[in-house]
């Protein structure tokens, strides 16, 4: 199994594949060609078909900023062979000459792939050598250790700093969500409901309050995600 850092990723909603992946790819390409005069990003297949609703263009433009002009081209009917979420980045000089390009795919969960097998830039090693909870339980019993100690043995002690950061982002998303009123972005003008449910739950008697608050918190994060807020994602 891969590292928990691959599972729990911090980024912008509303979609790990349509926002977090393109956002990361844009940062990588901009760092590679920071002195380019202007850039072009071609979105293919699923990214192009539903990208505007998932704020794909917004996160790309945020990364490049005003200092690095970028044109986004939508190709919803063109599917690259490796994956439906294909992207082609191009960098040009002031004479409009191509100085670099890069094809990359947003494969889900905020992860990227170049579709190059073992030579892929984004290949990551397997961190956990045991592949079932039964095996892990047997390891813990044989070693006289807890589950968290198995995680630390495989990941290293720095995993706790990362998970603490993820936990803080989770709590911040809840806090913003229950305090953020108004409509969600998009043409439907859906009203945010988390603040209302939080107020209701806070007034419940103690025996019911916990369940009501859990629902309000979940709704708060869902609405923060839908509005492009900073959240922690995990593949479905």
Image: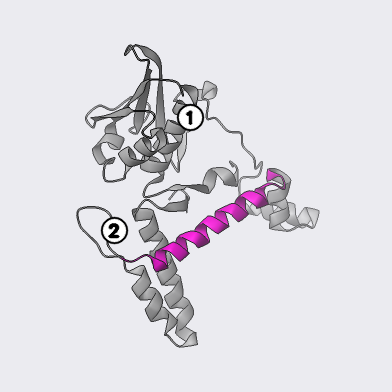
Where residue 161 appears, as percent x and y from the top left, is 65, 51
- The secondary structure type at the circle numbered 2 is loop
Q: Is residue 156 visible?
A: yes
Q: Is residue 216 above or below residue 57?
A: below
Q: Quadrant of residue 190?
A: bottom left
Residue shown at the point (31%, 38%) measured from the top left: 57
Residue shown at the point (38%, 26%) measured from the top left: 82
Q: Is residue 159 one of those drawn in magenta?
A: yes
Q: Is residue 135 visible?
A: no
Quarter in which the N terminus is drawn: top right
Residue shown at the point (27%, 61%) measured from the top left: 183
User: Which residue is most to the bottom?
Assistant: 205
Q: Which residues are magenta?
A: 155-181
Please give the count of numbered marks on the rendered protein. 2
Q: Is residue 172 one of those drawn in magenta?
A: yes
Q: Which residue is mark 1?
A: 28
Colouring? one colour
Where residue 99 appears, as percent x and y from the top left, is 40, 13
**Label 1 Cα neighbours within 10 Å, binned few <14 / some 14-19 / many ≥20:** few
Q: Is residue 221 above or below residue 123?
A: below
- The secondary structure type at the circle numbered 1 is helix
Tell me which numbered mark, 2 or 1, is placed earlier along the sequence. 1
User: Alpha carbon of mark 2 to alpha carbon of mark 1: how far?
Assistant: 30 Å
Q: Nearest the camera: 92 or 18?
A: 92
Where residue 17 appears, as percent x and y from the top left, is 39, 41
Where residue 141 appears, as percent x and y from the top left, is 76, 57
Q: Left of 77 or right of it: where is 199?
A: right
Q: Is residue 80 above or below residue 144?
A: above
Q: Nearest the camera: 43 or 60?
A: 60
User: Which residue is most to the left?
Assistant: 187
| Main SS of residues in magenta | helix
Which circle marks residue 184 in the picture? 2
């Amino acid at each position: 199994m891969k590292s928990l850092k691959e599972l729990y990723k911090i980024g912008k909603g509303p979609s790990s594949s349509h926002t977090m992946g393109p956002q990361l790819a844009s940062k990588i390409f901009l760092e590679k060609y920071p002195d380019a005069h202007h850039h072009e990003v071609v979105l293919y297949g699923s990214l192009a078909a539903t990208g505007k609703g998932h704020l794909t263009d917004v996160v790309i433009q945020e990364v490049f900023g005003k200092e690095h002009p970028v044109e986004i081209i939508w190709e919803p009917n063109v599917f690259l062979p490796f994956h439906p979420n294909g992207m082609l980045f191009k960098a040009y000089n002031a004479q409009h000459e191509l100085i670099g390009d890069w094809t990359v795919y947003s494969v889900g969960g905020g992860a990227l792939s170049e579709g190059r097998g073992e030579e892929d830039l984004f290949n990551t090693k397997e961190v956990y050598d045991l592949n079932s909870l039964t095996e892990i339980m047997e390891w813990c019993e044989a070693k006289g250790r807890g589950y968290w100690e198995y995680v630390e043995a495989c990941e290293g002690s720095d995993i706790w700093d990362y998970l603490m950061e993820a936990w803080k982002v989770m709590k911040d998303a809840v806090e913003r969500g229950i305090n953020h009123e108004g409509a969600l972005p998009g043409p439907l003008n859906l009203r945010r409901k988390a603040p209302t449910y939080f107020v209701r739950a806070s007034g419940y008697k103690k025996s019911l309050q916990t369940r009501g608050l859990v629902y309000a918190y979940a709704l708060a994060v869902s609405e923060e995600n839908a509005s492009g807020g900073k959240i922690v994602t995990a593949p479905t």
